[in-house]
Image (spheres, rainbow, N blue to C red):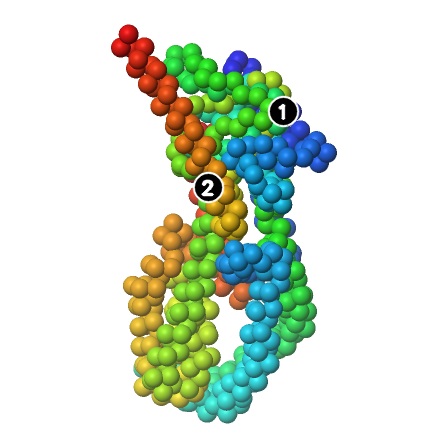
Amino acid sequence: MELRSLWENIFRRAAEENDLAALLGRVPIFEGLSRRDLQVIERVSHPRIYSEGEAVFREGQPGVGMFVIQKGSVRIVKDKGGGSELELAVLSDGDFFGEVALLLDAPRSASAIAAGRTELVGISRTDLIAVMDSKPSLGFRIASALARTLAARLQSANREFIELQEKTVQ
Amino acid sequence: MTPDAGRSSRAFRIFVFLLILAGAAATFYFFFTISLITIPILVGIVMSYLLEPPVAFLERRGVPRTLGILASFVALSIPIAYLSIFLPGWIAQEYRQLIEIRSPQAIENIQGLLADARVYLIAHSELFREGGRFDLSDLDIATFIVNNSLRVLQKLVKAAPSLVVSYVLILLLTPVVTFYILRDGRSMKAAFIRIVPNSHFEMSLSVLSKIDQQLGAYIRGRILEGAIIGSIAYMGLRIGGIEHAGFMAVAVGTTNLMPYVGPWIGTIFAMLVGLIEYSTLAPIGTIFGVCVIAQLLDNVLVGPLVISKAVDLHPVAVLVACIAGAKVLSLLGLIIAVPVVCIVKVIVQEFFAGLRSYRVA
């Protein structure tokens, strides 16, 4: 399983990485960036292929960066102990995950497991920071988009928390 | 994971580990046997770490990276061109002063010193008299010195053509290697990451960025430290009214690249130059004092500020590295051995730290 994805990662053809810049442009963090800026991000992104059941990362491991799903799907699961796990979400084409690692040098809060053959694009925190540092105006746009994304997440978490509180009171 | 899958995964990891080990051994063998290729690569890596800050500075101000690299090259070529015009004349002048004018007198003084020692030894111990274990009665010190000096000189003359060819090749290859490391460093990293198995993907990204950070800080720190110590020694020697202060300061700054033993080699070299120039004890005392003060300032002020503690080496490791370096690449090997071992230490240290935190070992 691991061996097959290893060979696929080494020998995948450039044509298979069809228009990575366009895919990145659909990710909220990179939304509104010019084609040229997206190509700069593309240069520091790492396309990977995962087999069914293969872990992209595991809960508790240090987080290095975020992933964008190019093709396929990924299960986000949390270990409940005793071999059982809680499925938090199933993500598919165009979705992204692990973006908290772009801001925090903290352990992963859940595991990400490939559900079937999945093509991902990984972007590390240090590479993205290097790009943001070398091109300050691009860096500003990415940082504000990242802040907007996280603010939207916080807003939705707040809403869910209030709903949950209301249900508990009733 | 089933027991079978677990076994095959373990076997795969062992296979990859053995492959990496074999690759590392082959790389070391290759590099150490073909030093002509090793030196431009090593110097290219060092140069790219030194030029990265100005290139990044220009890039931040909107200059395309390739143009920024070329601009840094042009900026660097001005002092290099100046040095290549100024250095040969300076070296020739120092050589004439030290070897042609001062040496005969110095050799005479040293000969006199040795002759006195010989007379003293023969007078005071049976061992050194005729028929004794270390018979010195027939030894002609002047002939002994001339013969040995000639042998060293002959060796140098014989080695000169190959040394010149090597240095010309190194001078031609190094800028090319530096340019491509600076321009395509990110693509080289991406190509390397591509061959890493998925289970080690995040770990590799983390380890590579830490190695890059540590190496950059170490290489820039060491060279900055050498320059500061060289400048301190130069100022001290000029204040002390010592001749050849520049020559001695360059030696002190360069040998400072080696921790522990380097500063002493530089000090001894400077004292030898002083011995040839003055043949009296007072200036040699001044040189020794200045070098010791420079070393103290290095240990107390400069070193802790510019060099990371993470790359500290045990004195025994430094000694072994120096001996191995000298054996493989002679004088250059002696100077670069410790920095190279530190680079390897950072790589191994970060690799195993990565394995531990990702629990894949």
Between A23 and A161, the one nearer to me in the picture: A161
Q: Position of residue B253 (x, y in %)?
A: 43, 70
Between B306 and B158, the one nearer to me in the picture: B306
Amino acid at dot 2? Ala
Q: Chain of mark 1?
A: A
Q: Position of residue A93 (x, y in %)?
A: 60, 24
Amino acid at dot 1? Lys
Q: Position of residue B34 (x, y in %)?
A: 65, 56
Q: Could you tell me which residue is drawn at 51 percent across and 15 percent down?
A: B1
Q: Secondary structure at mark 1?
A: strand
Q: Could you tell me which residue is drawn at 59 percent across and 35 percent down?
A: A25
Q: Which mark is residue A143?
A: 2
Q: Where is mark 1, residue-wise? A: A71
| A87 horizontally vs B72: left or right | left
User: Is residue B255 something one can see in this rendering?
Assistant: yes
Up-down: is B4 above or below B63?
Answer: above
Q: Chain of mark 2?
A: A
Between A42 and B358, the one nearer to me in the picture: A42
